Amino acid sequence: MLKTGTKTLDMTEGNIVAQILMFALPLMLGNIFQMLYNTVDSIVVGNFVGTEALAAVGSTTMIINMLVFFFNGFSVGAGVVIGTYFGAKDMDRLHIATETTIASTFVISVIFTIIGVLGVTPMLNFMSTPEDVMGEATLYLRVYFAGISGLLIYNIGSGILRAVGDTTRPLYFLILTSLLNIVLDLVFVIVFNMGIMGVALATIIAQFVSAFLTLRLLTITDEIYKLTWHDLKIDKATLKRIMLVGLPAGVQSVITAFSNVFVQAYINFFGSSCMAGWSCYNKIDQFIMLPMQSMAMASTTFVSQNVGARKMKRANEGTNISIALIFSITGVIATCIWVFAAQSVRLFTSDQAVIDFGVLFLRTNVYFLMFNCINHVLAGALRGRGDSKGPMIIMLLTFVVVRQIYLFIITNFISNTPALVALGYPVGWVSCCVVEVIYFIKKWNRKILKK
């Protein structure tokens, strides 16, 4: 039998609840610290630079997400393949998959840097970015994309570790580099008065540090996922298998992010105060979604390992438990955010108009996130089974098509108000939940129950 070492987590045996929580909790903490990168940028510019700078950082989030989310699809595909080999105890193929994943990431990093830097102005123009925000948004994005390879390398390295059940050490790296980002933000903005360029530089420096630490860990470890540099190459068969899962996930994420660019364009119509309030809402909303995203990743790893071990009923049981856990957690968080909405927005700004918009958006949408708990965990479980096309098609139809139809009708024929535009998110979440549950039951639950 393959020796798996002490830092991995074999999820094919043992208590399911304990294993899912053991995996998801460090991952959730890690995601919180990773989210702090952009959130701290917003807090610093909102309090020390101004409302226009806060709106600039917030309006760039969707553009950044388009490239990062596409790459995260690749990371999901790599994680499923590596997790399946880990569950099957296939050491040779796991080694090939690790080298292929890292080599491909280096190539993708170069491509994304070029696309990001050159595509800044067209994307900001497409979103109808106001003139008072355009200059700072352009500067922030160009600096950010010039250093995006650090983020991509860290994400793929931590994805390899997650696939074998190790979420603890990536958490340590994120804690360290998030604190570094905070210190650099304050130094560059307050001490050196670098403004929005300072927060962008602080972010990419911290991301490169996390990338270095992750690559070093993969290189010096004695675990089965050790990165051997002289074996670094792209194996076509392995890359194809990764892309079969990862490409649909990436395409779905990109198109969903692109759809959110349309939502941002609707919000931009109401001016910089509304844009800044929407930015605050999105930052808080992303934190609320972190537990469900972490549970979805846990579900993907749990399912992929058990599929590799041919334990399909256990995989299905883990999915149901994940949904129950995250539904309870999100309900508590949503209630706290609804009650303390104003205090949450004040972390980013003291501008009362911005606070009012942020509170409006939070209280309009926060409880609808309960539907997204089911969306994320089921999509993660489906990808863990190698079914990436199903959730891709479902999310494209609901998050993109249904949402855009709603926004077009509501703004052109009913009433164009910030609250009704904000409801575009829940419309997509609810419709996705209904369709995805039906799809999962019909395609997968019945197959498993028959076995």
Image (cartoon, grey):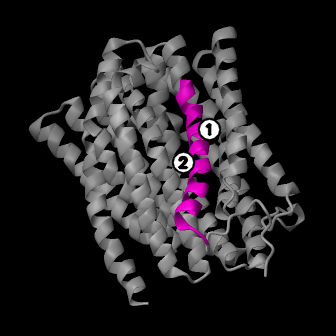
The image position of residue 277, as x and y in percent, is: 36, 24
Report which quarter residue 357 is drawn in: top left
Give the Cα separation between the discs numbered 1 and 2: 10 Å
Report which quarter residue 437 is drawn in: bottom left
Circle 1: residue type: Phe
Q: Which mark is residue 145?
A: 1
Q: Is residue 336 magenta?
A: no
Few, some or many residues within 10 Å of mark 2 (<14, 14–19, 20+): many
**Residue at position x 77%, y 70% from top?**
4
Q: Is residue 422 above or below residue 19?
A: above
The magenta stretch is 14-41
Residue 316 in sight in this render: yes
**In which quadrant is the C terminus drawn?**
bottom left
**Residue with the most extreme left position:** 414
Say if mark 1 contacts mark 2, CB within 8 Å: yes
Q: Which mark is residue 393?
A: none
Name the main secondary structure of what is drawn in magenta.
helix
The image position of residue 144, as x and y in percent, is: 62, 34
Report which quarter residue 325 is drawn in: bottom left
Q: Is residue 115 above or below residue 241?
A: above
Q: Which mark is residue 67?
A: 2
Circle 2: residue type: Leu
Q: Is residue 23 magenta?
A: yes
Tag count:
2
If you read the primary sequence from the N terminus, does the residue marked by circle 1 or circle 2 appear first?
2
Secondary structure under the numbered disc 2 in the rendered image: helix
Secondary structure under the numbered disc 1 in the rendered image: helix
